[in-house]
Image (cartoon, rainbow, N blue to C red):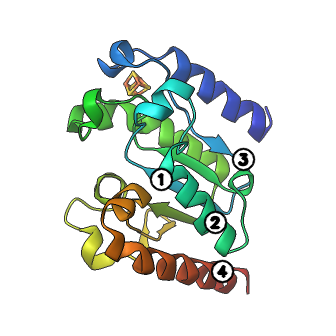
Amino acid sequence: MDKKALFEDISKNILMCRKCALGSSRKNAVPGEGSVDAEIMFIGEGPGREEDLQGRPFVGAAGKFLDELLCDIGYTREEVFIGNIIKCRPPNNRVPMPWEIEVCIPYLYAQIAIIEPKIICTLGNTPLNALVSSKLTIGTVHGTLLEKDGFKFSPMYHPAAVLYHGELKGTLKKDFLKLKELLNAEQK
Ligand code: SF4
C-alpha cells in the first residue's frame, strides 16, 4: 500500500472508532488533514465545537490564525499536516483525560510513522506533555528544538490561546520564523 492509502486507512478507522466515551458524544471524529509528505506536522489538543461539526481540524478563528502564520513562512495548509492528540471533541472543550489520550494516541503515532515529518510542532501544553515530556511547560520551551525517539519537536503556543492572550501574538509569530530557520537548517 502507498502512503496515501495507508493514511486513508487510518482515517477510516478513526471515523468508526468507539474506543473511548468521546466516540459517543462527538458529532464527527477529526482524523486531521494535509499532505502525507509534509515536512511539518502541527499537533493541537483536540477538536473544538466547529471542528466537531465539520469533521476538520482548526477551522475556527484559531485555524484562520494558523493559516496566516503558515502563509508568513511560505506554506499553505495543504502542504503541512494539521491534527490533534485526540480525534474526538471532549465535552465543553475540557482537557482530554489521560486515559483518553492513552487510548487515542496510537492513531497519531501511526500518522507520524507514515508522514515522517522533519519537525513536529506541538501547539500548547497538552500535546507537548503527551508527545515529548510531562515535565515541560510551553512557557519555558516554546520556540526551541527538542528531540525524542528520533523525532524533532518545536513546541509553540496554541493559536487559540494566543487569540485569547493577545500579548503572545508577537511571540508566536517569532516562533514561526524560528521554525522556518530550523527547516532551512534541516535542508542543508
Ligand atoms: S477520541 Fe480517539 S480513541 Fe476515543 S473514540 Fe475518538 S478516535 Fe477513538
> From the viewer's perspective, is 137 left or right of 42?
left
Using the image, tell me which numbered label, if any, was put on residue 70. Answer: 2
Q: Specify the amino acid type for callout 3.
A: Val
The N terminus lies in which quarter of the figure?
Answer: top right
Q: Specify the amino acid type for callout 4.
A: Glu
User: Which of pointers 3 and 2 indicates the residue nearer the eye?
Assistant: 2
Whether ligand 1 has any atom under 8 Å from the Cβ at mark 4 is answered as: no
Residue drawn at (50%, 44%) of the image: 60
Q: Specify the amino acid type for callout 1.
A: Ala
Mark with earlier residue (1, 3) = 3
Q: Residue furthest right?
A: 2
Residues packed near mark 4 inside 10 Å, few (<14), some (14 to 19) or many (20 plus) = few
Report the Cα–Cα distance between label 4 and label 2: 18 Å
The residue under label 4 is 186
Q: Quadrant of residue 165?
A: bottom left
Report the Cα–Cα distance between label 3 and label 2: 17 Å
Residues packed near mark 1 inside 10 Å, few (<14), some (14 to 19) or many (20 plus) = some
- Contact? badges 2 and 1 (CB < 8 Å): no
- The answer to whether residue 78 is visible is yes
Mark with earlier residue (3, 2) = 3
Residue drawn at (55%, 28%) of the image: 55
Q: Specify the amino acid type for callout 2.
A: Leu
The residue under label 3 is 36
In-front residue for pair 91/152? 91
Report the Cα–Cα distance between label 2 and label 1: 12 Å
Residues packed near mark 3 inside 10 Å, few (<14), some (14 to 19) or many (20 plus) = many
